[in-house]
Amino acid sequence: MKQQIGIMVILGILIAFLFAFKKGVFTSPGGIYDDLEVPETVDYNFHIKPILSDNCYTCHGPDANKRKAGLRLDLEETAFLELKQRPGEYALVPGKPGESLLYHHITTDDLEELMPPPDSKLALNSYEKKLIHRWIRQGAKFERHWAFLPPLKKEVPRFETTDWAQNEIDAFILRKLREKELLPSERASFETLIRRMSLDLTGLPPRLDQVQRLMENPPNKILSEAIDLFLAAPAYGERMTQSWLDLARYADSHGYQDDSYRTMWPWRDWVIHAFNQNVPYDDFLTWQLAGDLLPNATKEQVLATGFNRNHPITQEGGVIQEEYRTNYVMDRTNTLGKGILGLTLECARCHDHKYDAISQKNYFELFAFFNQVDEKGLQMDAVQAANEKFYADPPYLELTSVETKGVLSFVNLNGQNSVKVMVMNDAAPRETMLLNRGNYDEPTDTVQANTPASIHAFPDTFPKNRLGLAKWVTDANNPLTARVFVNRLWGMLFGRGLVETMEDFGVQGSLPTHPELLDWLAVDFMENGWDIKYLLKKIMLSATYQQKSELRDDLKRVDPENKLLARAPRFRMSGEMIRDYILASSGLLSTTIGGPSVKPYQPAGLWEETNAGGNRGILTTYVPDSGENLYRRSLYTFWKRTLPPPSMTIFDAPTRDFCEVRRQKTNTPLQALALQNDVQVLEAARVLAQNTIADKEKHSDLVARIFSRILIRSPKEEELSTLHNYYQDALTSYKSQPEEAQRLVAVGEYEQLPVDPIQTAALMLTAQVIYNLDETITKE
Amino acid sequence: MEENRKTKENPLKVNRRHFFSQLSVGIGSLALGSLLIPDLFNGTTKGSPVTRLGVPHFAPKAKRVIYLFQAGAPSQFETFDHKPTLRKRMGEDLPESVRKGQRLTGMTAEQENFPLMPPAVRFQQYGNNGTWISDFFPHIGKIADEICVIRSMHTEAINHDPAITFFQTGSQISGRPSMGSWMSYGLGNENKNLPSFVVLTSRGKGNSQGLYSKLWSSGFLDSKHQGVLLRSGKDPVLYLNDPEGLSRSDKRHLLDHVSALNKLHHVETGDDEIESRIAQYEMAYRMQMSVPDVMDISKEPESIIKLYGEDCQVPGTYAANALQARRLAENGVRFIQLYHQGWDQHGNLHNEMAGQAKDVDQASAALIIDLKQRGMLEDTLVVWGGEFGRTNYCQGKFDPMNYGRDHHPRAFSIWMAGGGIQPGINYGQTDEFGYNIVENPVHINDFHATMMHLLGLDHEQLTYKYQGRRFRLTDVAGDVVKDILV
């Protein structure tokens, strides 16, 4: 009997357990959600739409072909309609959650009725359900998607009790901090800030003499002088261009199978020039999208359209040209979306967008703008192209040395007579068809060039060509362009945009952490003539930007990701910036601007191991350059798409096969190996050591000198003693084995100075210790 | 570290798998030990934990994959799909009733007719099931009872780049993570001194197509899941070797000072990312030992060298890579991918196929035998195959003495072995022309779903949200091919 009861109890527990399991008791740690407080007023865009979009739109959203039960929840016009399959019933009844079938379906225990259906592997948590309940009770109000509403300058919050804030930006930041009862951080030291500003604006560390001279200003002038100094440096254009190259999928090779050579670098030289001239962003875009269509277009304006010929082009024998030509047009369309509008347009290539109000028809209407180019794909395979020096697929622009000595002086021909650059034209008018599933060989209905009205209707007065598209993109009423760019610049400085998904402002993208600040900046940017330098200076003069980056304990707990910006960010630099930093601090960096891309040190054999055969094109073997070309800035490093420079990809650079606007910031052992053993780094350490030893004018502490040379600050006592100990140990070690010192300092081809190899070796390794510090490769 | 950060990022989106994985820190994934990973169980994992996502969805059959990718697409008619009809009807035009409007590549689009070409080699039957295998592959013939030959693979791409991208990432569109990256993401790392996804390349003398680093890219997944190219020669991992004139002990001394200064700075800044960097430097230091150790075959006995063939002592050959693959598998690498280039036989088919087959036949078979004798075949999935098939007609003029075959997407052959695959079976059939599949088609998505299933992963569950969409290796399709499972 006892046994039976025991069995019954166990069975009972098991059944209860199974029931609980089925109910999802174990599948969501309910506690987390139960404790979250539902806001007093529920906001559709910020609270409700993310839930609906993520969980419901796949079947009840914009995609007409996949819609179930005739219910469409992303539009106000359809969400309140009587349900076709349940006459007299409604998904949403304003004010009445109990009568709203939507609420019933997300809360029911009946697995047959539960939404989202269990097999979708999606489920709402208790917090989300409560939000929806309150939203319906408060009237189930819809709003247009926040990013599709034109940005407005709302009133800047006022605070009487702060002397922290320095400009409008800080007011918006401070308001959020006060809501969370957090204090901002105080201003970082001038040394830190000058280094930070120099890295942000030039991609290089400041020189010590620059820092010294800046510090001679009155304290209230130091920072604005620093900003002006760096904005005026030619290196500013290079730094800005570096980030544009990922977006523009720039490369020195065609990509695909043979991946042979192309000459797009004069376009890159133009970008540097444009940034340095501070061409307003609306013109900057217009020239790149449609420079060729401007009245009396100059060669410079046509050159700018190379932007849309940077995509990969296949040289594979036997491809169906139309298949690839279609891909190229899609690439341009997708780049417009991801890079300029912050939209994942490519989702609508095969079907209506699942989340955003962009139909497949919208996609091909945009596609039509880029579909008029007189292009045929590459005319020859890699072998032929190499023989005939055919590095640009028509249409192209030929630049001669006569022109580059004149109006196009920013193009560095490097001794060549002329160069051809691929550019855009509209010389092959084509009818554009909607392609079923995005397949080139399944055309259906004819479409006309147009832009999605859900974002901003195309004004009748604009021409229906790329120039009209450019006007639409840069129209003051376009809700996206300025926001997206302001956000990208913010992301460049802070490591994360106000909208984290810098490439996606659609409904599935992240919401802005500070929507009113983003809008204020976007409007302010447009009001000030799309002036990029103005915008940068505005942000950098804010107290927000100038804060310390230390992670206070309270912030680590409350805001570990620093979304509220109660401190400045602290993050690892890009691979390019790290390499440039090391070259600059060692004194090796070349200041030459532009020209054909160069081939610095790279581990031997990489191209050879993966090419398609030794004779296939001219990029089958990697032959490093010598002399100055080894020390050019990293944006000039030769970019072969199928095997980009490893010292960049190890630090998260993309392949440039397509537009990319956000890089990861990983921390891996391969990065540690690269910094320790790359010839480029070792040689820089050696040259820095030799120069420091040879500099007879200064007899101060060698170790302290290389420290401040690299880190742009004086070492602290403990740091200095640690490094001294190391230096002495290394000296002792190499004194007992001088031949090892000789071998170590032999690294790199840069001229050896006649200084003691033992001392050089020890100081070189000390420099290596410093180059490998977290602080060195981090913007603080 | 990374995973923790992601969870914090979005506390409202703790999914079920993640929740469970936090409770049970990959017990299954710790099961395999090795001499090369001494500190796996007692080492401090702060900063570089054994990845936490790494828990299968259900009991796996396979713990790891060795993928022997034959890049360029070997012809099914000279490997595993025996079609005597092609010999009988040599020179006849491929009937339109068979071709059914299949699109052609630019290389044969202008061709007026499509003369059927016979297999360039004889076939024999092997094993208990009488599996047909061409005479180019006598060694694989001998392991016929261990492998499952699938003759009904199909794809949509007809050019190398999209086709190989499709096989690697489940999509023809560039930018998705490679399958090895997905496995690393889903199952984590078994050995924290080695990467979880490793790539080895070799090249035959046949007409070849280039390889690209995007094929082993982690796409939008964290770059720690990226395939690491292990190279033959003195620097197997990029930048692995210390510079000349710096001894191992001096290197240790240098690193200790880097760490000491980093620790000081950690205290000042409070940034735990610095701790993580210190840990990465330590792992790099350990890799400098573990990678050369695993690559060093000098202690392999003569019998093993004989098994794989003398070539395995020549670094950079397919045979050397196959042996390397076994050693990496023993040491807990999750996904080992070999690429052998040179299978693009548009012409000179007989000679080139013979050469390519000679490169890979013995070593591929040796790998199966070797894994089996170590008891590892049962939990190691081995796959052999290319990116599409080849046409049954010749490219260019009809010339029985020297011909080639163009690309064909509708049917081709691969084989799989071990890791829960039924040994010694044949699956799927093509018509007598070897052109269309008549029984049990297996799409690339199905193949991926099956591979994931064997590893204990539900292909519909392993997703990653990027740009608002949940991506899968199998995109929106794929069915597990249950018939070939044990």
Image (tube, helix red, strand yellow):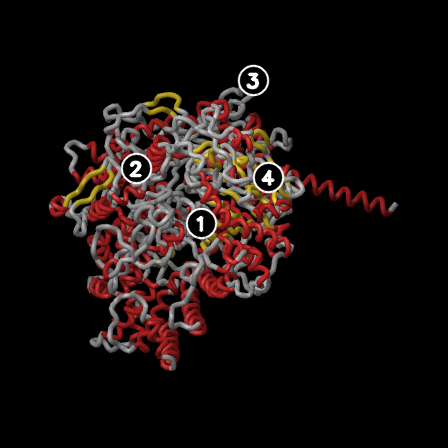
Task: Kindly identify which numbered label has been placed on residue A87.
Answer: 3
- Type of amino acid at the residue the image marks with label 1: Gly
- Under tag 3, what secondary structure? loop
Q: Residue furthest front?
A: B401
Relative horizontal placement of residue B260, taking residue A189 as reference (left or right): right
Judge whether residue B333 can be spotted in this image.
yes
- Front disc: 1 or 2: 1
- Name the residue carrying label 2: A378
Q: Quadrant of residue B246?
A: bottom left
- Name the residue carrying label 4: B132
Crowd band around label 2 with a 10 angstrom C-alpha radius: few (<14), some (14–19), many (20+): many
Asked if disc 2 and disc 4 are in contact, CB closer than 8 Å, the reply is no
Q: Is residue B425 above or below residue B247?
A: above
Question: Which chain is home to disc 4?
Answer: B
Task: Work out how far the residue at label 2 is from the one at label 3, CA to CA, in angstroms.
Answer: 59 Å
Task: Work out how far the residue at label 2 is from the one at label 4, CA to CA, in angstroms.
Answer: 42 Å
Q: Is residue B197 above or below residue A691?
A: above
